[in-house]
Image: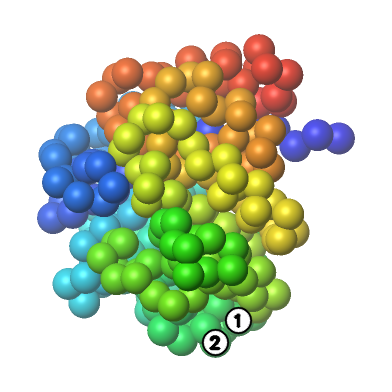
Amino acid sequence: MTLAVRVIPCLDVSDGRVVKGVNFKNLRDQGDPVELAQRYYDQGADELTFLDVSATVEGRDTMYEVVKSTAERVFIPLTVGGGVRSVDDVSRLQANGADKVGVNSAAIARPDLIGEIADRFGAQVLVLSLDVKRDERMPSGFVVTTHGGRRTTDIDAIAWASESAERGAGELLVNSIDADGTQDGFDLELISLMRENCAIPVIASGGAGAADHFPPAIAAGADAVLAASVFHSGQLTIAAVKSSLHDAGVAVR
């Protein structure tokens, strides 16, 4: 049986508002997170991803009230990331309505966190978020960044994804910083490398600009596709993306 591909709108939130930029820079206001979440739920989104993009940079917790308000109105899986540093953070997010948590910077700083979360809540709760950019220094050609793309590590992105899967991560949210916000299409090489080296589901993120950008991401190996600005602006709807996937022979809900 073929699993249906998931279409996931992403809400990047800073100071209580949804924002979006290009290559993680020049963030612009896109609206109220709860209202946008409701819109995407009504349109037929399969899941929602909510990322507090400034929580790690500012060293604070995710905005729990916004998460709670969203969960009270949206009845599809909700992944929340940004500022998650401990199993207690995961407990609190779940208490406020999160189904899954996204972890990035904290897992790189302390990799044991991945196993701690997976052991306590199950691998299905943990989404390892990777903000990746091209870097010729790395064996794979891709490097991991932290703090919302502001800091470049010395960690090969593919090696880290593989290690994280072995440690207990349930999914990989792979965001291409190079493609982010450009609307030129997903980084298919990056998606393919992730698929070839990791057995867990891969969520492709970064670069969507048209409905026909989504099927190639699935063909490259993604199990789900995520986008932000094209949905916020109304340039694309969930239905348009699902129609494009269906026409390409991809199973969708």
**Residue 168 located left or right of residue 155:** right
Q: Height in image: 219 above or below 150?
A: above
Say which element carries label 2: helix
**From what the image shows, is residue 102 above or below residue 6?**
below
Horizontal and vertical percent for residue 131? 41, 59
* Circles 2 and 1: CB atoms closer than 8 Å: yes
Q: Residues within 10 Å of mark 2 (few under 14, many from 20)?
A: some
| Residue 36 shown left or right of residue 1 in the figure | left
Q: Quadrant of the N terminus?
A: top right
Q: Nearer the viewer, residue 198 or 106?
A: 198
Q: What residue does disc 2 label? A: 112
Q: Position of residue 169 (x, y in %)?
A: 61, 68
Is residue 48 visible in the rendered image? The answer is no
Q: Quadrant of the C terminus?
A: top right
Q: Is residue 180 left or right of residue 103?
A: left
Query: The residue under label 1 is which amino acid type?
Result: Gly
Which residue does the image show at 73% across and 19% down from the upper left?
Answer: 249
Colouring mode (rainbow / by chain / secondary structure / one colour): rainbow
Looking at the image, is 234 positioned above or below residue 23?
A: above
What residue is drawn where x is 26% and y is 58%?
Answer: 53
For label 1, the SS is: helix
Q: Which residue is mark 1?
A: 115
Q: Residue at x 42, y 57 (%)?
A: 133
